Image (cartoon, rainbow, N blue to C red):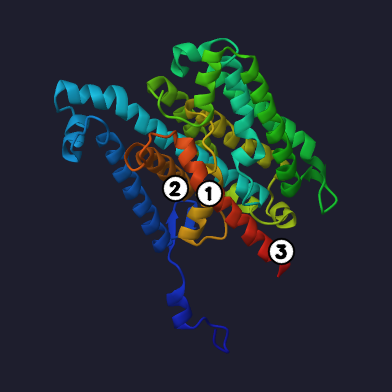
Amino acid sequence: MTKTGVAHPRTVRQARPALRLGGFSTVLRVSALLTVAVLIAVLLALFALDIATGDFRIPLGRVLDVLGGGGTRAQRFVIFDSRLPRALTAVVVGAALGLAGAITQSILHNPLASPDILGITSGASCGAVLILAGTGGATTGIAAAPGVPLAALAGGVLTAVAIYLLAWGRTTSGDRGVMGFRLVLIGIGVNAALLSVVSWLLSRATLTDAAHAQLWLTGSLDRSDWSTFAPAAIGLGLTLLVSAASSRTLAALRFGTDTTRVLGVRIQTQQALLLGAAVTAAALATAAAGPIGFVGLAAPQIARRLLRTPGEPVIASTLVGAIAVVGADLVSRTILPVDLPVGVVTAAIGGPFMLYLLVRANRKATL
């Protein structure tokens, strides 16, 4: 800035270009767009490898040919009836968990505020296990039990409502509302209680039903088919629509309460709407593949560091979540000597990452 109050030409050149379309305008960040493009390319590559890899190997070029309508009858059967539903379910489940984690962490201003830590996935698991181990639905496969997605959704929603009501109280500004730190602590307690309920349900089930439900509780894609993919895809689509329509509101909620209120945002109403969308995505993802831990926790934080943004980026978090689950499925079936459930692989990686977040938060608090 010069003495006359006119911006220096170098300052103007360093400003980020703006993108305007009608009444919509945003800042164009080339580095962020390139990062998102790389994430999409990585996801597509892992998706193709996940379809091509297995006991019956299919070359990558042949996979594209089969998806385009070519290939032999055996190759079409393997891809369309077995591997494609599993790979698509992995993409949708990971994307839904990453998106749900980005929304909850942005709203509650806490990197630990993910669906699995808050107890949402445990509530969905409780509802699903009630069907699987209580009515014998597991004996005919998860896909054959149409009540599982509805039970998981009901369990996740009821758990979220209970946590929200228990966390309601006086905020630091003296208003009535929900504080992020208080909600996280209550969610951790509710999560522990629901895990006990799940254990009790398993103890009362038959040995066969309990074994099927226990396999599902580890977070497995082994039973994936088109009927497990559909509910999770619907949940992801609805949550993407809500988050896109509320993108400006979500950005405003990342600020403090006073700043958000000055911007004209109805804090409690918008929080409830966005949290409801996140709960729907996480619950239906849990119904499709079981509780896959730490994806909703780690994906937004990884995306935030990749894009170097002050808040959790929604699109990048969705892509990182999908990459995490598809990559974990590929690793469990190819690199590891034993074919492990996806949830075991994500937990092995996500556990140390959670400890890293806790240590980092503790260091910030002591500075």
Name the residue rendered at 55%, 40% in the picture: 100
Amino acid type of the residue that numbered disc 1 sits on in the rendered structure: Ala
User: Crowdedness of circle 3 by 10 Å Cα count: few (<14), some, many (20+)?
Assistant: few
Marks 2 and 1 in Cβ contact (< 8 Å) = yes
In the drawing, what numbered circle is on residue 320? 2
Amino acid type of the residue that numbered disc 3 sits on in the rendered structure: Ala
Answer yes or no: is residue 202 visible. Answer: yes
Mark found first going from the N terminus, 2 or 3: 2
Please state the horizontal and vertical placement of residue 178, each as a whole percent of the image: 76, 43
Considering every residue shown, the one lying at the far front of the view is: 337
Please state the horizontal and vertical placement of residue 267, each as a whole percent of the image: 71, 45
Please state the horizontal and vertical placement of residue 316, each as a whole percent of the image: 45, 50
C-alpha distance separating marks 2 and 1: 9 Å
Q: Is residue 152 above or below residue 33?
A: above
Which residue is denoted by mark 1 in the rendering? Answer: 298
Answer yes or no: is residue 246 visible. Answer: no
Which residue is denoted by mark 3 in the rendering? Answer: 365
C-alpha distance separating marks 2 and 3: 28 Å
